[in-house]
Amino acid sequence: MLTQADQEQTGPIRAKRPKRDREATRRRLLEAARDLFGEHGYDHVSVRMIAAAAGSNVALVNRYFGSKASLFGEVLAGESVLEKVVQGDPAGLPRRLAEHVVRQVHRGPSSPVPRMLDRSIGNPEILPILQQHLETMLVAPLTEQLTGPGARARATLAATIIMGGGPVRRLLGLDDLRTADPAELTERLTVMFDAALSPGVRESK
């Protein structure tokens, strides 16, 4: 039996353990949700499936995230790298966006976000979350980088180039893009992004 002195010494150690357990459990739930949402889409993943894959229980999913939709939103936010791509010298923005798209093409199955979006976008429950994600991670940061008239429309056009490839991915796959020369693909996309973001339309010769 522990003496009072022993209890006082072990008390702080015991107090720290639940915090570590919570952080570890939360991380496992996020990782399990990321994999399942990427593989099956939002509609076909249940909270029970996520909890089981994480070695946890349904009550903890609700406690840490509130709902399956909120968990989906946290997975999206944690996986996105678009904000970092947008930040930096505005003059280099078209190329950074082009390089990002080429990286995503070649990463393939290792990145769950495109699959999550492709397989979940029709669900009205998470439509506000997807809209907010697109606004916060891409459209708003792009708009802030631009000058001249119609900045938001130009940012939205660039976002369309980045996010609009879902149907093509599903129907045709990405093999043609993956076998293309990455440098040439980057150059072509840079021209596309430059045209989308430019404040004026250049006249063709």
Image: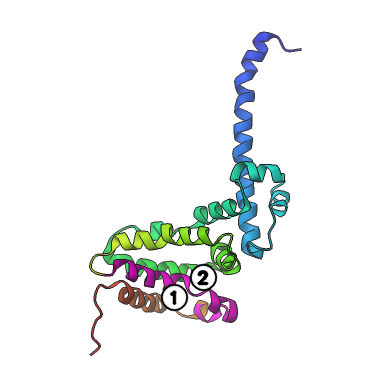
Q: Position of residue 186 (x, y in %)?
A: 39, 74
Residue 86: tell me if it is visible: no
Q: Is mark 2 on a helix, strand or loop?
A: helix
Eyeballing the image, is 36 above or below 158?
A: above
In-front residue for pair 98/145: 145
Span of residues in magenta: 150-177
Is 150 left, or right, of 51 in this rendering? Answer: left
Q: Seen in the image, is 181 located left or right of residue 42?
A: left
Count the labels in the image. 2
Q: In which quarter of the image is residue 92?
A: bottom left
Residue placed furthest toward the bottom? 205
In this picture the colour scheme is rainbow
Q: What element carries label 1?
A: helix
Residue in the picture at 31% in, 77% down:
195
Residue that label 1 marks: 182
Q: Which residue is identified by label 2? A: 106
Q: Residue at x 60, y 65 (%)?
A: 123
User: In the image shown, does 169 or 190 lie closer to the viewer?
Assistant: 169
In the rendered image, which quarter is residue 135 located in? bottom left
**Percent coordinates x, y for residue 108 in the rendering:** 56, 69
Q: How far apart are marks 2 and 1 (CA)?
A: 9 Å
Mark positioned earlier in the residue sequence (2 or 1): 2
Q: Do the residues labelled 2 and 1 touch (CB within 8 Å)?
A: yes
Query: Which amino acid lies under the numbered mark 2 shown in the image of this protein?
Result: His
In this rendered view, identify the residue nearer to me: 79 or 106: 79
> What residue type is disc 1 on?
Pro
